[in-house]
């Protein structure tokens, strides 16, 4: 059934009303309304070239040059992105006392920007940079200054936004791109996000699982669950006989395990939480691009 804007789904409202300790898992579908593209179509298939793997990033200087050149152009859009109605609705869910924990697969920090406090960034944060040599962490904003300074002219190029702070920049000679190294030890810098082919830190998974164990139900918002790092939480919830529901436009890899799936944009489906909280679900101005 098509989901008309403004239509309320009683299943979702009942599910949230019935469970006071929800474990919420969010994905890219939460942030598309903030101008951050996602990787997958409604069938859960890749819309575009799959992202760089950890192995290629650390193993190949040309891959790092291409990655950081594209990131130089893609970062400002992430830095300027603002939370949308879906983020604000989930922050309201926490305020209303229904959220045991929010676990996000997104790396954009928009849940925290919307006011959610109980957030675990499963795949890290794009606004942090880590040195693979000495472990020193630094800010992506500062690295942006270094990238721009070291690569005159690149910041003026125009490229379409791509997922995870990437930008579609091709047909360039990346061999001249100067990739900054760690200030402290000269080591290799990497965004502090979990790349494809890389494992989520074990303690982070354990902390999230402990919250899931305390929850009475699980709600998936804006994820197709195609990646095992997220899917395993649905499996754990089902093993524990906790009901799982989802809000996602397209199919998910766990559709057969769900009580129901609301096939609607996240912000539309969750807007009733903003109404209940006395705040109106007004979409903020479009992000300048
Ligand atoms: Zn270092």
Image (cartoon, rainbow, N blue to C red):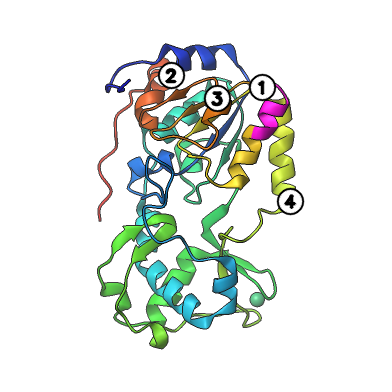
Q: Which residue is mark 3?
A: 258
Q: Which residue is mark 1?
A: 242
In the displayed structure, 150 sits above or below 40; it is below
Image quadrant where one finds the C terminus: bottom left
In the image, taking residue 41 as reference, residue 197 lies left or right, namely right
Disc 3/disc 4 C-alpha distance (Å): 26 Å
Instruction: Verify CB contact (< 8 Å) between mark 1 and mark 2.
Output: no
Q: Name the residue: 45% across, 79% down.
A: 65
Q: Which residue is mark 4?
A: 202
Image quadrant where one finds the N terminus: top left
Q: Earlier in the sequence, mark 1 or mark 3?
A: 1
In the image, taking residue 9 as reference, residue 232 lies left or right, namely right
Query: Does mark 1's beta carbon lie closer than 8 Å to ligand 1?
Result: no
Disc 2/disc 4 C-alpha distance (Å): 36 Å
Q: Name the residue: 74% across, 43% down.
A: 206
Quarter of the image where one finds residue 234 = top right
Q: Name the residue: 47% across, 50% down.
A: 108
In the displayed structure, 17 sits above or below 119; it is above
Secondary element type, mark 3: loop
Q: Earlier in the sequence, mark 2 or mark 3?
A: 3
Q: Which residue is mark 2?
A: 277
Asked whether residue 121 appears in the rendered view, the answer is: no
Report the mark closest to the observer, 2 or 4: 4
Report the mark closest to the observer, 2 or 3: 3
| Magenta span | 235-242
Residue 93's spot in the image, x, y percent? 51, 24
Q: Which class describes the residues within 10 Å of circle 1: few (<14), some (14-19), or many (20+)?
A: some
Q: Earlier in the sequence, mark 1 or mark 4?
A: 4
Secondary element type, mark 2: loop
Report the mark closest to the observer, 1 or 2: 1
Disc 1/disc 3 C-alpha distance (Å): 10 Å
């Amino acid at each position: 059934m098509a989901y008309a804007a403004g239509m309320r789904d009683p299943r979702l409202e009942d599910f949230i009303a019935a469970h006071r300790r929800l474990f919420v898992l969010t994905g890219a579908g939460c942030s598309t309304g903030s101008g951050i593209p996602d990787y997958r179509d409604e069938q859960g298939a890749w819309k575009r070239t799959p992202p760089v793997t950890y192995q290629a990033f650390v193993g190949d200087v040309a891959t790092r040059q291409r990655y950081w050149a594209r990131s130089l152009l893609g970062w400002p859009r992430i830095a300027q992105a603002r939370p949308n109605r879906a983020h604000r609705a989930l922050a309201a869910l926490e305020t209303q006392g229904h959220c045991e924990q929010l676990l996000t697969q997104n790396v954009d920090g928009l849940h925290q920007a919307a006011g959610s406090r109980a957030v675990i960034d499963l795949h890290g944060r794009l606004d942090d940079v880590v040195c693979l040599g000495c472990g020193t962490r630094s800010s992506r904003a500062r690295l942006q200054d270094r990238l721009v300074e070291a690569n005159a002219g690149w910041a003026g190029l125009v490229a379409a936004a791509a997922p995870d702070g990437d930008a579609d920049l091709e047909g360039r000679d990346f061999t001249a791109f100067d990739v900054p190294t760690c200030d402290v030890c000269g080591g290799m810098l990497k965004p502090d996000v979990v790349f494809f082919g890389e494992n989520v830190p074990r303690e982070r998974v354990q902390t999230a699982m402990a919250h899931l164990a305390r929850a009475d139900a699980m709600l998936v918002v804006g994820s197709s669950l195609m990646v095992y790092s997220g899917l395993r939480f649905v499996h754990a919830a089902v093993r524990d006989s906790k009901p799982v529901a989802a809000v996602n436009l397209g199919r998910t890899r766990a559709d057969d395990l769900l009580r129901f799936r609301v096939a609607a944009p996240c912000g539309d489906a969750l807007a009733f939480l903003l109404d209940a909280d006395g705040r109106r679900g007004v979409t903020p101005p479009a992000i300048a691009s």
